[in-house]
Amino acid sequence: MCTTCGCGSGEITIEGTPAQGDRAHVHAHGDHHQDESPAHGRIVSLEQEVLAKNQLFAERNRGWLEGRGVLAVNMMSSSGAGKTTIIERTIREWGGGVPISVLEGDQATSADADRVRAAGAAAVQINTGAGCHLDAHMVAHGLERLRPPRDSVLLIENVGNLVCPALFDLGERARVVVTSVTEGDDKPLKYPHMFGAADLLLLNKIDLLPFVRFDIDRLTQSAREVNPRLKILPVSAQTAEGIVDWYRWLSAQRVCD
Ligand code: MG
């Protein structure tokens, strides 16, 4: 069990490459479980150890990515907020001749990696088993398979939940949290770690605003309360409303290289 978030470690599988392929099996969070024993009994210490080990892998990933000019963006949300749909549209529409590749995180299935490949990008699926988040060690193995090209963009779609993914640095350059108008406008206050750690909030499904009770001003206010520097972009991945602003933001991150 992960001492940081309580999720089960299980067996991690990393599947597929741009050319498809076999499946690899890695252990969650590196090999920190080897010295996890009931006798240890110091949960806080173990938690620090897990996060310290993750940070080591994260810094390695960051160095590897930056050395190749790869802009890595960690995309997080609750399940069903529309991350994959945003990624599909981005692959199809975002110009500039910049290759996009994708690491997909889900507990099971390669459904999202299949969708991403169908949209035209290279993708590797990481299945976390009982785990509720990606960690930097999983991403390191995913990168070994994906091998994103130099001067490209890597989108990392994290496992869908607003809690644990916020704790784990993957070596990304930027963090995006996606929330949707069907989820309620009070999410930032309920999940301050997630919204506090993000660089950008994509408010998705704004095409549904006429049909739901959702106050954008309230969302903005609560988001700014936990993260005053958070940029907020309302979008619809279905109708493309506002989506150009997301593409502009993505382009600006590359300019920052
Ligand atoms: Mg998805």
Image: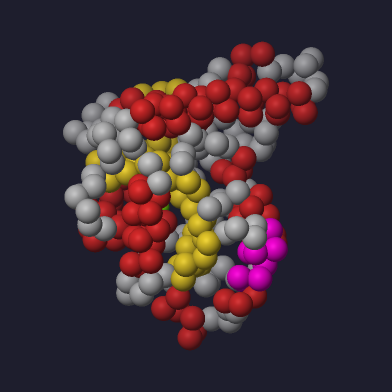
Please determine whether, in this image, residue 103 is positioned above or below residue 76. above
What are the residue bounds of the magenta stretch? 219-226
Note whether residue 142 is visible.
no
26 vs 77: above or below: above
Q: Position of residue 94 (x, y in %)?
A: 26, 58
Q: Kindly report the secondary structure that dominates the magenta region of the rendered protein.
A: helix
**From the viewer's perspective, is residue 136 above or below residue 250?**
above
> In the rendered view, does 47 fall on the left or right side of 110?
right
Q: Residue at x 66, y 13 (%)?
A: 35
Q: Is residue 93 left or right of residue 200?
A: left
Q: Is residue 31 visible?
A: yes
**Residue at 19% from the left image edge and 50% from the top image edge:** 97
Q: Is residue 180 above or below residue 71?
A: below
Percent of width and height locating residue 66 = 39, 32
User: Image quadrant of residue 26?
Assistant: top left
Q: Residue at x 67, y 67 (%)?
A: 222
Q: How is the image coloured?
A: secondary structure
Q: Is residue 208 left or right of residue 19?
A: right
Nearest the viewer among 204 and 198 is 198
Say if the magenta span includes residue 36: no
